[in-house]
Amino acid sequence: MLDPNISRYIWTHTKRQQLWVLAVVAASMIPYFLSLNLPKQIVNGPIQGDGFADPAAMQTFMQISFDVPWFGTVSLFDGVQLDRLNTLFALSGVFLLLVIVNGLFKYYINTYKGRLGERLLRRIRFTLVDHILRFPPSTFKRLKGAEISSMVKDEVEPLGGFTGDAFVAPALLGGQAIMALAFIFVQSVPLGLITTALVAVQALIIPRMRRRLLVLGRERQLTARELAGRVSEIVDGINTIHSYDTSNFERADIASRLGRIYKIRFDIYQWKFMVKFINNFLASVTPFLFYSIGGYLALQGQLDIGQLVAVIGAYKDLPGPLKELIDWDQNRQDVQIKYNQVIGQFAVDGLIDPEIQAVSTERADGKLTGPLAAVNLGVTDDTGAVGLDRVNFSLMPGESVAIIGNAGSGADVMAEVMARIVWPTHGQISIGAADLHALPESLSGRSITYAGTDAYFFFGTVRDNLLYGLKHAPITDLVFEGAALTQRQWEKREALWAGNPEFDIHSDWIDFEYQGAADMTALMPSVYAALDAVALTRDMFDLALRSHVNLAEHGDLKAKTVEMRRILRDALTQQDLNGLIEPFEPGTYNTEATVIENLLFGNARTPELMAGAIINNPYFLSLLKQRGLADALFAVGTEIARNAIELFSDLPPDHPFFQQLTFMRADDIPVYSIVLKKLDKSATSVTESDRAMMIRLSFDYIEPRHRFGLLTPELMTRIVDFRTDFHGGLPANLKDAIELYDPEQYMVSGTLLDNMLFGRISQKYRDGVERIYAVAGGVLRDLGIYETLLSIGLDFHIGAGGKRLTSVQRQKLALARALIRRSDFYLFNRPLSALDTRTQEQVLISALKYLRRDGRAPAVAWVISHAKFARLFDRVAVFERGRLVEEGPHAELLQKNGIFKDLISA
Amino acid sequence: MLLNDEVKMLKQVPLFAGVSPAKLKLLAFTSERVSYRSGDVLCRQGDAGDAAFVLLSGHADVIVDGPTGQIKVADLEENAIVGEIAILCDVARTATVKAATAVEALRISKENFFKLMSDFPEMTIEVVRVLADRLSQTTVELSEARSRVAELSKR
């Protein structure tokens, strides 16, 4: 556990470095003192002429000799003889030298302290996260993630800064202050006494006044932490907030918290500047006394001018260290409070022994034999509610057991206890002869695989999350050379200094050999099989097809995709489905595509050519007019508007039918009808912008879908002709603004699906997409890009907590993640509750089959959501009110008139 | 076939005969035009009914799963409507409809149909009238059938 006293904690971990830096500080005192004495020598000697009464007088400079007791004077350097002016320059030169030496000392000490502080900060942060990893599970019921992370990230930050100063600052500053004070005493005892008195007042009053600042500081810390917690709650609960319209309640809460924080911070400022004012005042009163009393003494002849100048000079150096010393003390108390706050939160009883989580590259298979058994097991939660009551249950190696029970029956608690997620209150879980909770996690966490209802996913791709359950320990020792080796050695050394483990995150954390594969590539087929088992393959395909692919990463995918266009079409033709995709052909109007798609025949890459804005593009518009298409499309648009108004004008604006009206919004209808009325009066009364609006309306028209009968063969031919001219005369500034549809080229601006179909799916066939999928699967395999596509799907980024996946996909992914692990025991806790019953059964069957592949025979306990699935298991265990009430093979339980029968018939 | 032609076809469906052309046009516009090849299944017995179909061209067979296999119980031609019962009262499809030739159909989804009925009561009244006609006809046929059964059992 962390030491409750911050100074002791720092001392324990940085003793040697602190002693070293103290020694350096002590050494730095010598040039510092010399630099204090020098001004007096310069003023009294060369400037005032002391010892230079005769213009030709010379003085010895730089004589270095020591008086050694019982030995006499040892002279190292006899010195040189200098006259008055040269002495002035020589002494000034020495002064400059001392300034530089002092500066260098400061530089070294500061850098050293900084490094010391950063190392300790790293140590504290790591220790805190290590503690989180070792908290007993029940702790997490009362923790807010954001508050804990704000402690690790922000609240310990000042501790790092303080570390370097913890011992050095009082030594250095205290030393300087005492030195300066002593110097003043040597010059003049009365002035020394005055200074001491004022320093004493400062040192007594200021810390007292600052005590209130500490209290406020603690409040500030707590409120800021709570704010962090609330903000993350808002993020996590955003759907609840939206659906219950409580956003303003949240606003009020945040505003009131910010108000409190503001008040605390403002109080801090007020008080801080008040203290500063008094401090400054006391510090400036002293020179006043020096000038008045010191001046008086000098006039009286009790003090020479040189002494007075030196005292004032020395005093200039006194308030600095003194103030910093007071600041240091303040900082110490502040940091101590913060530190206590943080470690108070992290002082949890029953922390998991580090030994249990020790890293181990040893394999777990075969280490734990015998049944996973609960003996007289009881679980009571912190409210006293009973989860399990004196349960005896065992899961024999190789058998499959269905655990069943209604909500609150204890069935799910049973699975959680066996998975070590919930700790038992009475009794124990044993695995063979060993107590499960005494085993290292490297054994239990690999021998036992658990998947529950709400699995957590980490920020990353599907692949990262799928393989997450395999990353137990760094398996390979990477070999480093040259700069990388130096870097790695530095990493290791620093990790050691800061008490961090030196595991290499870039090592292979997956034991491929144990997974039965040589490397990642060889592992993937079994991963894909698991995806098949949980019916997630199709989702992965969808994700891949809807993505814009980075072609450089996938070798010949580009060429294969272009090839696929033809092969897919042939395959469809073979199945008499040739009308399903209407391909883009340069010389033909694609009736399943919109008018604008046919005009441009390419993907717009810049906003100026996108559907909404293209009508304002001068090149496009002028060509449209030149070809007479402006008038023709204006007529088409007008007809569309007439039809739309006829169809929809009776409907209220929020009517769901408006969704069918892809080219118009409900509130556009009055606008269009005004234009139509104008047009009916006289064709000349419509403005240019009215015309543009109507032409714009024609762009989204698809004849087979909207069926207004507006596209004549002649118009279609003219549109195709326009296309050629448009591409041919493209001005330089638009060259890159559009990517043309070219049957022989991959379109970078399109998704993978766009590129494979290279056409539009016909509206005519119901389930067209499904039929294409059915055909495409085979084509992809023939082309050898099936796995490439799956792999692209696996690269999909699932977002925070997997929120970019649906709840069904998340559950399937969680199950697949569990299936690909090689364990002796598998525990599933209603892992498919988001799926419909039929799919649940399919997935359950294929998952059991997957686990038994290659002659493996792990034990499986599955908490099932429907009693009818029980027949798929060797044995059934029925729970009710925390107790195991019935147990036995499915057929046997059906015979009994017990609870199982009730569950089946329910 | 264009929207206006579809409206003419709908007009000939007894269920929609009394509905104004403007409403039929809206119904047609919000419905899907679908094509089936010969042998394709429009809807399958036992599935949830989510749409009715109006045949615009081609023929389709209505097939029921019997104890001895599939039995063709009816033949659908142009202008026929099928599946309207399933969307009116949440029951599963009572029969399978299979295209006998290439079929063009209008697929009227349940939501759109209900939405139109609730927005335009006059349409609902027409539909109710047609259904009531059918019911009374069925009732007559049923009582005839019963009396025949009674006569047969008397012998």
Image: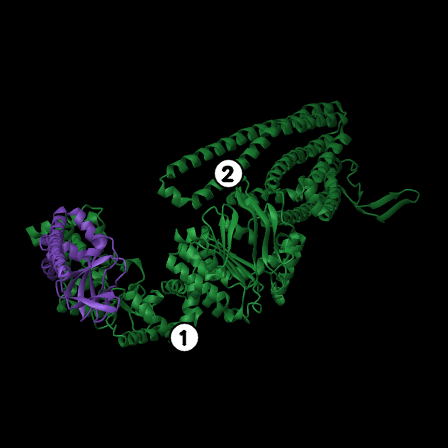
Chain colours: A green, B purple
Q: Nearer the viewer, residue A39 or A36?
A: A36
Q: Left or right? Give the position of A806 relative to B122.
A: right
- Image point (62%, 61%), residue name: A368
Q: Quadrant of the C terminus of chain B?
A: bottom left
- Say which amino acid is labelled 2: Glu
Extreme right residue here? A70
State the residue position of label 1: A784
Q: Quadrant of the N terminus of chain B?
A: bottom left
Marks 2 and 1 close (CB-CB < 8 Å): no
Is the residue B42 above or below the residue A643 in the image? below
Percent coordinates x, y for residue A410 in the rendering: 50, 48
- Sequence-first disc among 2 and 1: 2
Is the residue A195 above or below the residue A694 in the image? above
Secondary structure of the residue carrying tag 1 is: loop
State the residue position of label 2: A226
Secondary structure of the residue carrying tag 2 is: helix
Tag 1: Cα neighbours inside 10 Å, few (<14), some, or many (≥20)?
few
Q: Left or right? Give the position of A566 relative to A214.
A: left
Distance in Å between CA atoms under marks 2 and 1: 55 Å
On the question of residue A663 being in view, the answer is: no
How many numbered markers are drawn?
Answer: 2
Percent coordinates x, y for residue B63 in the rendering: 21, 66
Chain letter of the residue beneath label 2 in the structure image: A
Percent coordinates x, y for residue A791 in the rendering: 44, 67
